[in-house]
Image: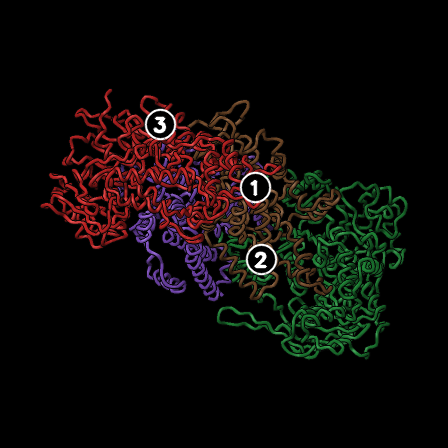
Chain colours: A green, B red, C brown, D purple
Amino acid sequence: MTLLEVENLSVTYSPRDSAAVRAVDKVDFGIEEGEFVGLLGESGCGKSTLGHAILRLLEKPAAITGGSITFDGRDITHLDEDELRPLRWADLSTVFQSSMNSLNPVITVREQFADTFAAHPEAAGDRPDVDARAGELLEMVSLGRDVLRRYPHELSGGMKQRVALALALALRPRFVLLDEPTTGLDVVVQRDILDRLRELQRKLGFAVLFISHDLGTVMEMADRVMVMYAGEIVEDQPAGDMIESQLHPYSAGLLGSYADPRDEVVQVAFVPGRPPDLSREHAGCLFEPRCPVSVDACRTEHPELLPAGRGQARCLLVEQSPDDGALLRDVAPTDRLGGVFSADSEPRARGAADTEPVMVVDGVGKTYRTKRGVRTTTTRAVDDVSFALRPGRVSALVGQSGSGKTTIARLITGVERPSSGTIRFKDTRVDTLRRRAMRRYRRHVQLVFQDPFSALNPTRTIAYALGRPLRNHLGMTGEQARQRAAELLETVGLSPAEQYLDKLPGQLSGGQRQRVVIARALAPQPEVIVADEPISMLDVSIRAEIVELLDRLVRERGIAMLYITHDLLSARLLADEVMVLNQGVMVEHGPTLEVIGQARDAYTRRLLAAIPRPGRSRESWPDEPPNEAERVPAGS
Amino acid sequence: MMRRPRSTTALVAGMASLSLFLTGCTGTENADASAGSDGMINYLNFGDFGGGTAPKANYNPYLPAFKLSATDYVHERLMIVEGTKCREVPWLATSYEWTDPKTLVFDVRQGVKWNDGKPFTAEDVAFSFNLLKKHSALDSVGVWDSDLTSVKATGGNKKVTFSFDKPGATAFTRITETAIVPEHIWSKVKDPTTFTNAKNPVGTGPFTVKSLNPRRLVIERNPDYWQADKVKVKEIRFNKADAGGQVEQLKLSRGEYDQQGMFIPDIKKSYVARDPEHHKYWYAPGGSISVYMNLTEKPFDDVKFRRALTTAFDDKTVIRKAQLGYVKEASQTGLVVPGQEKWLPKGIEDQGRIAYDPKAADKALTKAGYEKDSQGRRLGKDGKPISFSFKVPGEWTDWVASADIVIKNLKSLGFEVEKETPSPDAAIEDRQTGRYDMTFGVHGGSCNMYNNFSDPLNSDRTAPIGKKAMSNEVRWKDAKTDELLADLKSATSEKDQKKAVAGLTRVMTDEVPMIPIWYGAKWFQYKTTKAVGWPNAENPYASAADPLLWMTHLKPAKD
Amino acid sequence: MTTPSSTSMTAPAPTGAGDTEGVRVAAIAAGRSNRLPGWFVILWRNGKCRFGLWMLLAFVLVAVFAPVIAPYGPRVDDFGLSEGPTGAHWLGTTARGEDVFSQIVYGARTSLLVGTVAGVLSTIVATAVGLTAGYLQGTVDEVLSFFINLGLVVPVLPLMITLAAYSPVKGLGLIIAVITVTGWAFGARIKRAQIITLRTRDYVTAAKFAGDGTARIIAYEIAPNMMSLIVVGFMGSALGAIGAEAGLAFLGLGDPATTSWGTMLNQASMGGAMTTGQWAWLVAPGIVLALLITAFTLINFGVDALSNPHLRED
Amino acid sequence: MTYFVRRAGFFLATLWAAVTLNFLIPRLQPGDPAQAILSRLTGKSQAVDPAQLEAVRKMLGAPDGNLLAQYGDYLGALAHGQFGISYTYYPYTVTDVIGDAIPWTLVLVGVTQILSFFIGTVLGAWAAYRRNTRADSWITLGSTFVGTLPFFWLALLLIFVFAITLRWFPDGGGYGGGSQPGWNWLFFSDAFQHSVLPGLSLLITGPIGWILGMRNNMVQTLGEDYARLARAKGLSRRRIALTYGARIAILPNVTGFAIALGSILGGTVLVETIFNYPGMGRLLLEAVSNKDFPLMQTLFLFTTVGVLIANFLADVAYGFLDPRVRRTEAA
């Protein structure tokens, strides 16, 4: 019997005085007992809203405006809070997106278990032995029992998420909703937690709705995958089938953005455009504006979610095709998608590996001192790192969070000074520059930031953001600067530029913003660009676009780029050489293919192993156990 | 209506009933049996008793700024010079005599006892004065600032002799203002300057201290008082009323005080009208409040200019509007009339009051060489428009209102006048140091004619601009005045004194060192339900500041 | 006493309420189409705040058009003394024969002037000190922080009274100065905390890489993003200033020559409004003062929502 | 450890700043105390007798030596707890005078502050808990309208209604003229009766800040993920409101409350003045208007020290209540 049945469910946000937004639109699906279902979608598609609706946790101004949710044969759509309470946690539990904030900061972990037990005597017994049961649960998620006595802030992000997971399983629920449970965690930790989760799910047999934007993970974990776009489910298939053939062009696009960096030829696709505005009515298919294979009918006719293959899809083309999605299959991958970026095993047509380097980092180390009372703790963030950047070439710096990547970026851009070693830009010693010289130096070295949302001042127009470096570094005047800013926007593919110049960052999408950030970095015509995880905050479907842009700039302008990332795939796509950093030490350094293909260092291999490989059996873990659980964040 | 207010109301009601329960009932204090059957008044409710907002026991009569008012009912003086007509009333001394201009002898009253039973003698008197000589900080009336050289008990301990090295007539009122303390107590006090005399203060007065808490001071009749037969009040209760705000005004208007001395607006409506038969007031005139001109500046240094201004000010409007009609128009002579009319020189019109006559002022100014230009501006002798400032403490609203009228008068004569309203401290300091063009000042009003004229006019009492003047704030320097003052100082006979005073009043009217506008009022309200015989305009036998005199006049009301 | 309502000024926490970003964007877009700043839109959306803004507007209009609205000048004392309400004098006359209603009308000017000027001044001081301390850090920060903390623990009311009492010149300027001197510290502390989080924003780093100097970064990059906090600070200071002015004036520490509701209460209290039964004279200034403070408090409901998205009414 | 040293350092530095400020205030002001005292005594409309002025000046004494020497003497006297003789209550010492006033203020303001905090916190929490219901509107709007009444004005009306018209309560003072301060029932009931109206005027206007602050904080904490998770966990509304809402929301108010408690020593000038309540606030106003510098300096010092100590205690309490701070402190 179907455990959870969602029928025709709609959720609308109706803010007081702006247009209502139909965030979830007539969603239909069911989850069987013990089934592991993935829900895939990009930011803003309504997947979290759907999750909250199922848990009946929606708050004003969001409300269920249609359809029903049936759990175990009982309609829970309109139950009131008192009637819901016995069901909650005992039957339906959840792990939230941001583990950082989902535990009560002022009570111990033990108390958070205790109040859960106390709230459900029918499931937990009248006088449960909290220590024994919670301890057991914590051990289940590879945590020690001593965690019970701790407060949330004393735990690392990964530990908190494990606690949240243990908490979710405390009452042996029949259904667990996982809403991006590992977002924001380090890849290696992510991997570990998800593996543990899948194992537990198999063992305990609860059903899971796994919400994520991380396609690789979903494909690998789930039995069945649903893809959501603009508030609608556009495809629903067994995971295996979806890897083989995607029914909906959007799913195809998403899947195309994934590749294994170890492959000989790596091809990554992207879907241009952005999701529709849901506060307006749309006549046709919602994906039509971005769809590479759309036909005229798509513009006028709204497709239904109809059976196709072993699943369902919402696409006119699928509807019309006699053998379910055959139409898509016929089209070559390159054609059916908006754009493709590929890298093969040949060396790239870029600057030569032996040209004179513009930037040389030699034996650089950085030590932080934190004073606390009489004791002084020294942390070695970077230890004896040496490398060189050459014109027209990309060096990738790979490592997990806290490995010292960002410190290196700060050192070579002169934001901080090294404790030891030297950094030279051409003939200039960067590590000894004084104020004014530093300003001149920065003309030559620019930064591309990780988060396009914080990299642009929300109160300043694009023209202002681009104009500043032009005026300061190139001494341009108003009209000149505006002219050049427009050119720069065209260069980064924001065309026509006039349309963008006077906009505020808030009016642009994430991808557009990142292009502006890149344009700003290009403005003073730098010789070195340090790109700090420039794609990690972007939606999967547009990451390749940015990678392509960066590649083109390096090629055309002969810029030397330091590309900082934790993501080996993008390193594989972009970099000529890869350096792997672990706890401040460079553990591996060499041409991209060599490092990725034949990783020698154990840590590099763990990074590689953490990459999800849908449809393939997982490699066994490398020898070292995760060392993350023992670490406690410094200061909170 | 709302959750909280509802609970507030409940709270109020709850507290109210609780407190009613706790104390049984309130307001019993006012349910009094006023006149006793023994021809005595059981008690009277008086106003404030000094000592700040949270008074602490202090009955040291030599600390006038800090003592509680009970002190004045415990410690007596040789004579009382009452404050309206300046009559000399024998008190602890039965009479006095200037045996020569440098020797003053008092006959000390016999049979007076201290309230601890010990007899009062001339030794006590001599001790008291010599105590002040030793501790000059206690000499708040300045007895020893005069030419007094010694005070001795003489004549078989029945007389006290004051010796001066120069004619000492002016010291008389100072001597009569000095309280007499018992030697047998005070001789044992280590430091009389910090002595609070807190426990059972011993004096000769009609009352003794009964109880004190910071809200109320109670004194009771001294049955062994030397004129006990005249004192019909058994007990006086002083009530802390320092705030002087609405609440006090309300209490006064409701008749909760038998006597009070406070400002209350619109007294006819708010006090008298409540009980016209019993609610009375008498606002006797005090010191003159005058327009001070800085005599070191032009054009104020020109006597013709000043004389012209004497008719320029609309005193009546000031009194009616700014002073709420509580005060009287002041005489240009510097005397407080009609109380001091006996000092007036012969033939002076309307006791020296000068009527408002802007036309006359205008004419006199023009005649004196201060002409108006075509735009109506009054020009100085240098041909420039005359402009000056008028300083008045901003917080003293009635003064500000008075200043407004004065300024209006001046403007209508063509002067450019700017009003400045500094804080009282700053204003007083500016007046003392002479940093003003025109302002209000206070002078005179006491029974010591020498002080009345010497303080504001003696060239000894002034200082250059920028230095603090002792009391001559207008910077009047005139040899003739100094001479008249010297005459007055040494004049022991009333005739000589009158002659000198007449000369000084003429300085005031002819030379116009300042222009008096109104007399400051002495607030005095009383109620006749329990006691009658209060001083008032019809029977001004004493001023508001002479409670010992009323105590011997008050009688139970008959009803 | 500090205002506890503003002690919880943390950086806007991410709302866990699902996909609300679209909604937020819509709100900003709505504001943009009207050419109104975003913070104003948030204020306007709050019903209580909107009502407060209307009330405030009414006060502002009364203040601006005081000479038109008031039948007489505030200090014209040509009328009968201590009269009760009549057709000619809606709220009666004072003990000095001035028209109470006219004084109320003109008093709005004083209160608003004090509120605005003292609010602006202390906001400027708070912002300047807070921004400098927070942005520069190091010794400058240590020194300024000491003064901020000092300003926080120095008892404000006694200091205010002392300053007000001992100044040689009375007047609105003094009151404003006193309020400014005693009222900037709290805002400075909050702004310092805020800038410490803002200064590490990527766009600040980006501005440095674009070659901008410190002053320009503070003025152009950071300050505009603190607008909501500055508005919060301003509203708090203005509210405090209006209350403080009334309180000081009531204690008799104001300038009696200024017509303000505080001095009116002081004069009503001293001038025997109770004894002569002049109810309107005593009650009216209190009520208008309460209404003005209520307006500010209502607006503060919206202002709180600026810094705390959870409080937004949507 | 450093934390403690830093706090203590700040404490001492502030104390020094306050003490120095106190030293400077009288020396920067115009006018002299003798003049102020006598002007007040005689009133503005009568001339002050120069002889009397001279006598009072002699009595109060003038500081001698240069400024630095005076400063040294002043610090020395303070170190020995000598605050000097009050100019208003001469020859009583400042300590005597303040000693009389402190209990009144402590009881009246202390009790009302604590009650205000308590009432405000409970109502604020209730409003947040019932957010967007009528209860919420009543509490927030009601407290807004009531709480914004100028409390000195409210105090006047209370006096008029309850003391003058209804005669339920006395019109001012800490106790009646008839009772003698002492440890007896009669005096206590009298004192209580006198404290009702001033207490009420403080209580009506006091809680609004706490109500709105608590409500805002709690609306925020209830909107956090942990509160949502608590709902998902099926915890009772009560449990969520208390442990996940109020427990966390109250933390930022603790500091404010401590400062409020610390400033108790300063009294409430307005209320104490209107009700003639014999507390520190009225004393302060009196000291200021009489230029009673020794008294004023000491009151200032007391208040500052009170706030400082309260701040210090607040930090300690905060560390105790908020585990997030505790760790930093222990480290």
Image side of residue C75 versus residue B198, left or right = right
Outermost residue, left side: B156
Q: How far apart are marks 1 and 3 (CA)?
A: 55 Å
Tell if the residue under mark 1 belongs to the same chain as the one under mark 2: no
Q: Tell me the element at label 1.
A: loop
Instruction: Tell me if residue A545 comes above or below residue D30 in the rendering.
Output: below
Outermost residue, top side: B559
Amino acid type, residue under disc 3 in the picture: Arg
**CB of mark 2 within 8 Å of CB of mark 3?**
no
Residue B237 or A237: which is nearer the viewer? Answer: B237
Chain identity of mark 2: C
Q: Dot 3 corresponds to which residue?
A: B254
Instruction: Tell me if residue B47 comes above or below residue B151 in the rendering.
Output: above
Pinpoint residue D154: horizontal percent, then vertical percent.
46, 35
Q: Dot 2 corresponds to which residue?
A: C129
Identify the mark at residue A467; answer none if there is no mark. Answer: none
Residue A578 or B457: which is nearer the viewer? Answer: B457
Amino acid type, residue under disc 2 in the picture: Val
Image side of residue A595 versus residue C310, left or right = right
Image side of residue B449 versus residue B4, left or right = left
Residue B435 or D278: which is nearer the viewer? Answer: B435
Chain identity of mark 1: B
Res. B115 image quadrant: top left
